Image (cartoon, rainbow, N blue to C red):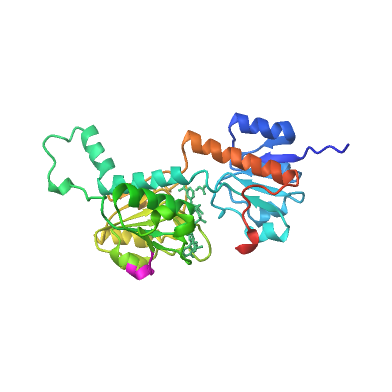
Amino acid sequence: MSDARKKVLVFRALPPDQMARLQAAHDVSFADPKKDHAAFDAALAEAQGLIGSSFPIDAGVIAAAPKLEVVSSVSVGVDNYDLAALHARNIVLAHTPGVLDETVADTVFALLMATSRRVVELAALVREGRWDRNIGEDLFGFDVHGKTLGLLGFGRIGQAIARRAALGFGMPVLYHARRPVDLATQAPELQGRANHTPLPKLLARADFVVAMLPLTPQTRGMVDAALLAQMKPGAIFINGGRGATVDEAALLAALDSGRLRAAGLDVFAREPLPLDSRLRTHPQVTPLPHIGSATHETRHAMAALAVSNLLDALAGRRPAAVFDTAAS
Ligand SMILES: NC(=O)C1=CN([C@@H]2O[C@H](COP(=O)(O)OP(=O)(O)OC[C@H]3O[C@@H](n4cnc5c(N)ncnc54)[C@H](OP(=O)(O)O)[C@@H]3O)[C@@H](O)[C@H]2O)C=CC1
Ligand SMILES: O=CC(=O)O
């Protein structure tokens, strides 16, 4: 009987129970390429399976892995992977859609609430001992309930955000995507509450614009000065998708000019956010360290799905969540 054990390289730590599942089936090594490049390169040369996240698996990395059969990402976004290079070698790319939708939508809503009600700024006022009288109008917030939400991207996570907005906060939802979603079959609870809307109309009407877009050649820099200039004066911008979909200099200019009320950002063009970035300290920006899916439950569910995907692919079965590298 031939040995079905294969070589797996883990490039970002997995929970112990998920590491154990891999080790029971395959010969597993761990190397963090940001800390030990030599160990990563050595294991890569032999690896048939690769699993991890938050590191660019570019054409060079793929070329250095001649035996690679599957890459399993512990993320839903696949912008860290050279899709063409994977496709050219018929390497399976798996990811983790679905299991993180509700958690990421919660994070986006936390940013929406925090920016509109100035939660971080006012908590700092209390902590720093500056709460010495009833706050005045200068520190009042902006209602969320009943306001119009404009969504850029209306996929799995966008729809989870729309449900919170429409069903929980009575917000009309307008969305922008290349194709309209058939709400009757995909999200009947949003019928009559969410509408596919031409982008200029969405921007002119929305009190909150939330970007929940994947990073692709088409979406890179999509939120630029021209788009921001079409937003309603005093609107709030939230980004829960990918930082590079936004022209950050243009966003800062829109905040500085007073055109936008505030921005809530979970993602940035460069992560971790450089210390000299004005987005880190701008008074109208609520910055988060890319924590969209970062709860114990959801990160564990993502790891478990990614491990299942890898095990299936190495056993010659189709994983539950394959990303179509040909469609990119
Ligand atoms: N902050 C965080 O921690 C997290 C961030 N993310 C990011 O969120 C992204 C979205 O995730 P998910 O909802 O699962 O993805 P989906 O693929 O389900 O949804 C993507 C949406 O974007 C739309 N879209 C794609 N390209 C364009 C375009 N060129 N113009 C307009 N709309 C476009 C799609 O519609 P259509 O194809 O019809 O245009 C669809 O509505 C991920 O790719 C990831 O980058 C995800 C999880 C956590
Ligand atoms: O950013 C997170 C992801 O899962 O994608």
Magenta-span inclusion, residue 219 = no
Q: Nearer the viewer, residue 120 or 31?
A: 120
Q: Nearer the viewer, residue 189 or 30?
A: 189
Image check: 45 left or right of 232? right
Please indicate, yes or no, whether residue 12 appears anywhere in the rendered image. Answer: no
- Tell me what residue is drawn at x 58 percent, y 32 percent: 15
Chain part drawn in magenta: 196-201
Asked if 303 appears above or below 179 in the picture, the reply is above
Q: Quadrant of residue 91?
A: bottom right
Report how many numbered discs are placed on residues in the image: 0
Taking the spot 34% from the left edge, 52% from the top edge, the residue there is 166
Location of residue 314 in the rendering, given as x and y in whole percent from the top left corner: 73, 44
Q: Position of residue 130 (x, y in %)?
A: 17, 35
Q: Residue 211: x and y, percent?
A: 41, 57
Give the position of the N terminus as an image quadrant.
Answer: top right
Q: Residue at coordinates 65% horizontally, 52% vertically from top-left?
A: 93
Evaluate whether residue 72 shows in this view.
Answer: yes
Q: Where residue 85 sits in the image (x, y, percent)?
A: 68, 59
Quadrant of res 42: top right
